[in-house]
Structure formats: C-alpha cells, structure tokens
Amino acid sequence: MLSSTWLAARNSILGSVGAFALLACLGATPVHAAEPIFDELRFGATTSIGDGDNQENGVFPSVTVFFDPFGADSATGFIEKVLRPRVHAGASIATGSNGVNQVYGGFSWDVDITERFFVELGAGGTVHDGDLNDDGTSGPKLGCRLMFREYAAAGFRFDDHWNLSATVEHSSNANLCNGPNDGLTRSGLMLGYKF
C-alpha cells in the first residue's frame, strides 16, 4: 500500500510538470502554425548509479516532454543548432525508500550521427524532495531544493516517430548551497515518440 506522503509527493510532481508544460506552451511561439504543441514525448525508467550512502534504492519511472519553440528541427549548421535548442520538462518518481522525486526542465541539443543514430545533451534545473542535510539516514544529502541538472543520451530511431535512448543524468548544487552536495546520478532507458 502506498503511503499518503508518497502519493502527495507524486501528485505534486505530476501537477507541477503539467503546469510547467502548459506555461511553456503558452509562452512559446510555434515556428509553423500547423505544428503540434509537443515535439516529442519520452517515457522510461532510470536507476541510481551512485555509490555507498549516495545510492538510491529502486527505479525511477520518468516522463519528459519536448517542445520546439525555436525551430531546432529545421536548424542547419553548427551555430544555428546551438542557438536553437529544444525545451524539455519532465518528472521522475522514486519507488524506493531513500529515492528522490524530481521535477526538471531545461534545454536539449540533438546531433545526428547517422540517419538512425543520434546523441543528445541537455542542461537545466531540477526541484526535488530529497534530504537536504545529513540526518544519519542512507541516501544522498543534497544541500538545497533547487539544483542544476544535465544529461547525455545516445539513441536509435526505429522510424520517423519512435526512438529508444540510453541516458545518463546528474543533478547537484555545484557547491552553491550551504550543506552537503552528494548529488544524484542515474542511468536508464527512454522510449520516445516524436509527433
């Protein structure tokens, strides 16, 4: 049976992702009027690759939505691709007792290696519900609620819509907060659908 604390955290995170996605959509001007609001939806799961007391238990089901307000899909040349990232927003839910729930957002850049293979980098921020200070329990101690988040992915496109990517992500406060900075490091798989 799920605890009321976990359910409240999950509902809060999902509500925050929905609100963030709505605000991003309202504030973004579409490049072409006929294009859909969402550029891509990815869902999957990650697991902690931290060590010792920084290890989180369980898996982390995740969902990420991507928007293309700057026309990243039509960018040509290196400089134009850098200046026209996609925007992403998402959440991950902890299933273990010392896991950390997150809501995140930021910018993403894709590079095609071949017609099917691609790599992607992303950077932004995250808000979490993890422990801030060392209270003697296991699990990462994170220092402050708002942290930096970056990720890297390598993926394969099955067709024009479906893709699968392996991801590695890291979140930390970059020692800008008083207190510990154990950080969160996870890896996993994400299945994507591009609209």
Image (cartoon, grey):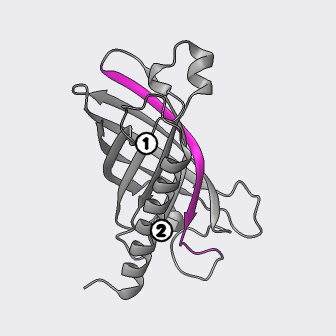
Residues under numbered marks 2 and 1 in contact, where contact means CB atoms less than 8 Å apart: no
Q: Residues within 10 Å of mark 1 (few under 14, many from 20)?
A: many
Which corner quadrant of the image does residue 94 belong to?
bottom left
Residue situated furthest left in the rendering: 158
**Residue 22 at what x, y percent from top left?**
46, 55
The residue wearing badge 2 is: 100
Residue 130 lies in the magenta stretch: yes
The residue wearing badge 1 is: 66
Q: Residues within 10 Å of mark 2 (few under 14, many from 20)?
A: many
**Residue 67 at what x, y percent from top left?**
45, 40
Q: CA distance from mark 2 to mark 1?
A: 23 Å
The quadrant the N terminus occupies is bottom left
Residues drawn in magenta: 116-132
Q: Is residue 14 above or below residue 175?
A: below
The quadrant the C terminus occupies is top left
Please state which amino acid type lies under the numbered disc 2.
Val
Q: Position of 77 compared to 33: left or right? A: right
